[in-house]
Amino acid sequence: MTGSHSVLDNNSLDNMLKIKMPAVGIDLGGTKIMIAAVNSEGIVGETIKVPTPKSPPNILNKFVELINQIKKEHLIAGIGIATPGIVDTELGIPIGATGNLPGWTDTKIKQIIESQTLLPVYVENDANAAAYAEAHTRNLKDKKCVIVLTIGTGIGGGILIDGKVFHGANHGAGHCGHIRISTDNKRLCTCGLFDCYEAYASGTGLLATAKEILANVNPSQSPLAKDLALLSNEAVFAAFTNKDLIAEKIINTWHKHLAIGMASLANALNPDCFVLGGGLCNFINYELLNEMLIDLTLPKINENLKVYKSELGYHAGMIGAAQLILDKLATVN
Ligand SMILES: [Zn+2]
């Protein structure tokens, strides 16, 4: 009995150390790599940012170099890597949709980095990793369903069910930016399909909406109509702040587009909440969005439905990747 007690004590001590110990979190983007030591409470020490090397072998070499750099400062429990594309998380391999990173699909990230660092590695899609971090940070992991949307150039999505990333049948779940919101075949999405949610509600979609509306506006009605080739979302937001009525119409339409996609997701999944991140989440009128959501969702669905703004910003993917490997290690032992 005494013996088994001491084994248990050792195990719980081991668990405690692992929970306190940081993991390396890596967020691989098309243009830059972000990396830091992260423990269950957040980033420990400095975040390193370097440009993304051009080829998969160079990216992997850069990972190892940066991991070794962090290992000099911290005792590391494991490595979490957030990457664009659909990821087979069992094998730690991106299996599709990595257009920004030529040749990256099918790279055996987990196997290669584990063999070179002798540390356990977990690889996850970047939007899913970001979703995990948002839920972790906000203590939402005990919720039934949390949907995290990253509203930037495109729309990234991650769905958490019972605190776990929902991957679907072929690892592809959470592509919320590609639910269809119109039948017009009007806007071609980057994915090759027409009228995806992100073709309307992302930054790219907002700019397209602005140009459509301004095409029928005389520059005397709004200075935004002067030169559509030079139009930017920043100019639209600035005009909106200056009470430009056309800018108000554009922003209102953008909110409708945002709400339509969220309402479809909500009606299908009955989430406890949405968390909105990405560069554009600071420009959302959450009161207006909530009113629109109530109009577009079933009464039982919008009862207690919350919409939060991300608190993690651009670090979410990196933090989430590290927390995923830490939690995985904690459950294994
Ligand atoms: Zn699409």
Image (tube, grey):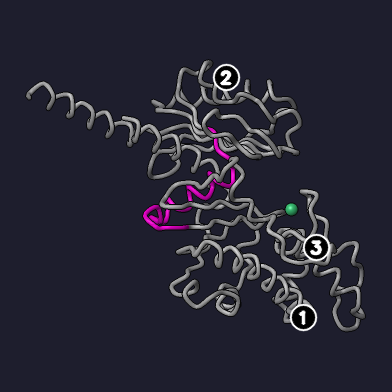
In this rendering, which labeled residue sits more in front, label 3 or label 2?
Answer: 2
Magenta stretch: give its range. 123-145
Which quadrant of the view contains residue 201? bottom right
In the rendered view, would you say 124 is above or below 225? above
The residue at 73%/34% (across/down) is: 101
The residue at 48%/64% (across/down) is: 273
Residue behind mark 1: 244
Which quadrant of the view contains residue 142? bottom left
Q: Is residue 78 left or right of residue 212?
A: left
In the rendered view, would you say 52 is above or below 276? above
Query: Is residue 143 magenta-colored?
Result: yes
Q: CB of mark 3 within 8 Å of CB of mark 2?
A: no
The residue at 40%/28% (across/down) is: 77
Local crowd size for mark 1, using a 10 Å CA cut-off: few (<14), some (14–19), many (≥20): some
Residue behind mark 2: 112
Which quadrant of the view contains residue 182? bottom right
